[in-house]
Amino acid sequence: MLSPPELPVCIYAEQPTLIPPSTSTPNETLYLSNLDDQKFLRFSIKYLYLFKKSVGVDILKKSLSRILVDYYPLAGRLRKSQQDHEDDDHKLEVECNGEGAVFVEAFMDIYADEFLRFSDKPNRSWRKLLYRVEAQSFFDIPPLVIQVTNLRCGGMILCTAINHCLCDGIGTSQFLRAWAHITTNNNADLPIIPFHSRHVLKPQEINSEITFTNPGFTKNTLLDNINIINRYYRSQLLIPSSLTFTSSHILHLKRQCTPMLKCTTFEIVASHTWRAWVKSLDLSPSLHVKLLFSVNIRKRLNPEMPQGYYGNGFVLACAETTVKELVSANLHSGVKLVQRAKSSVTDEYVRSVENLLEDKTVKTDLSASLVISQWSKLGLEDLDFGQGKPLHMGPITGDIYCLFLPVIGDFDAVRVLVSMPENVVDKFEYYMNAFSDWEVNGEADGDICVERKDFT
């Protein structure tokens, strides 16, 4: 088994520069919705792209400056709302001042093929590939930070950090694809015009009564025995686990539900992953566990959200059951829980969440929950700045959140990436491979692509 190499030192060609919009942009304050302003979104989404051939840095800077005219809030700065709050949970807003995105050029003495060999899981040395902005707090970090690292072979690694309070996964994909489009078609129009206003998600009746309790949120700060999962995670070294489900694997999973139940790839893989996660942690049978997963609400509202909306246009759906009910039942039952949670996301549900989040003591319940974020169907892997599509696309760092990632060259496949405590990662991967009625070409379990390299 090959050990991952420590990446060489990143050599910076020059000091970080600020790339402002190429022409004047509105000087205004951008309101952020309650969905944007959630505390669990106060971080940057960090993407890593590996390209076989590099693109000139001056070309990338010029096109970035041009696209920031259209996406001018990303050239602004996050700040606490000017409205007074009596507590510390300040609402956020964006000062659209055209200050610019942080852009860094670097060189690393490594070949693209070397990096690709170990690209299935992030490791700590990858953090060298994204410039760390020295800041007092999250508020002081610019919404957009970019590092372009040229490689020995003539390839490049492009890393981006985009503030999650401004964009969700669909929004970041929309921005990055627009940037690539302008890079290769300098005078072309954008395929999608960004829609900036977040007032379409502003609570209509701020003081209205919440019509139902949402299981995905809590007001408790101490959750007693349920908090055991978080304590368990904090006490262990976390190891990224990466498993690729091909279309063949997914078909065999689905056959465990048909003809009684039709389901999507996401529903079947999410249910299977949730069960494997719960089984591997060896939890009390009576413990209530949750699966939280993002649901795009752009077409679920009445009226539908405007095209080009790139803010946080999702809510977390919540499937909930006991450990005993989840692990003892068949996969069919887990899929039904996921489908029921997804179907509950209606216009009324979303409006109720907006109102619920007016109470700043309400937080997403992460205590006994697996959180899945879907990156695999956003078109993130199709980025082309003029020298071809990426050899690899994924996160820079591992996390306890579970990511469903695209597989380069296979649109129907899904790569599941999640960090697990060191002493249970093997058990988790065993359960992920444990397909009932699994048979491919006469061979039994274990056909999923799993490589246990200790990326820590």
Image (tube, helix red, strand yellow):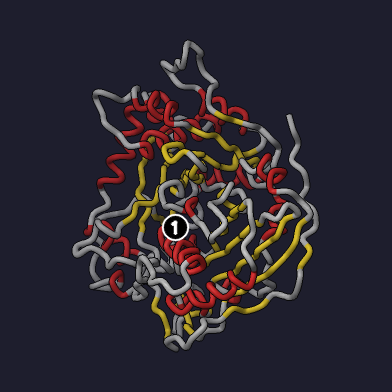
Q: In this view, does 51 lie above or below 325?
A: below
Single out the residue that lies furthest toward the top. 442
Instruction: Name the residue that disc number 1 marks.
Output: 169
Looking at the picture, tell me which residue is in the foreground, 442 or 107. Answer: 107
- Bin the neighbour count of mark 1 within 10 Å (Cα to Cα): few under 14, some 14-19, many 20 and up: many
Residue at position x 39%, y 23% in the image: 252
Residue at position x 66%, y 75% in the image: 136
Where the C terminus falls, by quadrant?
A: top right
Residue 88 locus on image (x, y percent): 51, 75
Looking at the picture, tell me which residue is in the foreground, 454 or 109. Answer: 109
Q: What element carries label 1?
A: helix
Residue 86 visible at all: no
Q: What residue type is labelled 1?
A: Gly
The mark tally for this picture is 1
Q: In this view, does 297 lie above or below 96?
A: above
Residue 26 visible at all: yes
**Residue 262 location, quadrant:** top left
Residue 45 locus on image (x, y percent): 53, 60
Residue at position x 69%, y 61% in the image: 149
Residue 159 locus on image (x, y percent): 61, 60
Residue at position x 47%, y 31% in the image: 246
Looking at the picture, tell me which residue is in the foreground, 132 or 379. Answer: 379
